[in-house]
Image (spheres, rainbow, N blue to C red):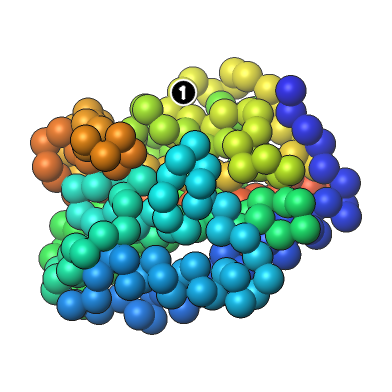
């Protein structure tokens, strides 16, 4: 069941998202060679707590940390560790916040210093696929129009979309209906209505879409070892079009 949110509820989700967005800004500045993903997680958790929020991922189905930090071939759900970032790496940072009963969720992928052109293109295509999807996230269109927009654009650029993880509705729960896959046929599934709030999150692999889950039970990595990027925004569908709640 897709839960329609009131204006007031959307404002609350926006407040949660605002903490997420500001934390991501802060973390982006801290990303540099030599920093560990655990140090980044600590900064994220401190920022969220100091802002009055609760880290939404910590304890979610036993997930151990405030953030998911996925480096290079890690697709999503990288568990912060002693791994040191290196020049030329890419690092995806995914954060969720609970504030006043409502969740916000967003992710970015950032470069550690200078990255090669191929990797830069992977980041550009992934981020652009998110904004293309957001552009068509309006009443009358369907959820699968979002999915198809992402898939067409990503595959047209020569990359692949991950199937095992999808975007989602968000509100009083971190994951609500509808699922928002990054693949699918246009014109299928529920119509978008004003008051729906969706976390749209393309996960894009440079090579094949096949993945493996590490022994920690969480971290998804590409099977071929090539790189993967992830961008996510929480977006409200309104009568006036899409509203990106997780943008500053
Ligand atoms: N943005 C991801 C999602 O919506 C992150 C969830 S991490 C988890 O699924 F730890 F909370 F599972
Ligand atoms: Co999400």
Image coords of residue 120 (percent x, y): 24, 62
Image coords of residue 70 (percent x, y): 30, 54
| Residue 58 drawn above or below residue 24 | above
Identify the residue at horizontal 72%, vertical 64% (top origin).
15
- Residue 13 location, quadrant: bottom right
Instruction: Name the quarter where the C terminus is drawn.
Output: bottom right
Q: Mark 1, residues whose alpha carbon is within 10 Å: few (<14), some, or many (≥20)?
A: many
| Residue 240 drawn above or below residue 110 | above
Q: In the figure, is residue 46 to the left or right of 124?
A: right
Q: Nearer the viewer, residue 83 or 32?
A: 83
Identify the residue at horizontal 35%, vertical 80% (top origin).
30
Image coords of residue 47 (percent x, y): 54, 75
- Residue 212 location, quadrant: top left
Q: Nearer the viewer, residue 47 or 118?
A: 47
Residue 149 seen in this snapshot: no
- Mark 1, residue position: 184
């Amino acid at each position: 069941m897709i839960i329609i949110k009131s204006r007031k509820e959307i404002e609350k989700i926006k407040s949660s998202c605002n903490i997420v967005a500001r934390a991501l800004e802060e973390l982006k500045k801290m990303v540099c060679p030599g920093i560990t993903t655990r140090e980044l997680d600590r900064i994220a958790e401190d920022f969220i707590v100091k802002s009055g929020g609760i880290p939404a991922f910590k304890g979610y189905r036993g997930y151990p940390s405030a953030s998911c930090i996925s480096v290079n071939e890690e697709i999503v759900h990288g568990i912060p560790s002693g791994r040191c970032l290196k020049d030329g790496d890419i690092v995806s940072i995914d954060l969720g916040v609970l504030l006043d009963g409502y969740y916000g969720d967003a992710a970015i992928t950032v470069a550690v210093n200078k990255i090669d052109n191929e990797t830069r293109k992977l980041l550009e295509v992934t981020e652009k696929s998110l904004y293309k999807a957001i552009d068509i996230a309006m009443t009358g269109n369907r959820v699968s129009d979002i999915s198809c927009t992402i898939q067409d654009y990503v595959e047209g650029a020569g990359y692949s979309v991950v199937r095992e993880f999808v975007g989602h509705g968000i509100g009083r729960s971190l994951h609500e209906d509808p699922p928002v896959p990054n693949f699918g046929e246009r014109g299928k599934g529920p119509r978008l209505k004003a008051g729906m709030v969706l976390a749209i999150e393309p996960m894009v692999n440079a090579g094949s879409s096949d993945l493996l889950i590490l022994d920690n039970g969480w971290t998804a990595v590409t099977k071929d070892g090539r790189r993967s990027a992830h961008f996510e925004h929480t977006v409200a569908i309104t009568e006036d079009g899409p509203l990106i709640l997780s943008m500053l």
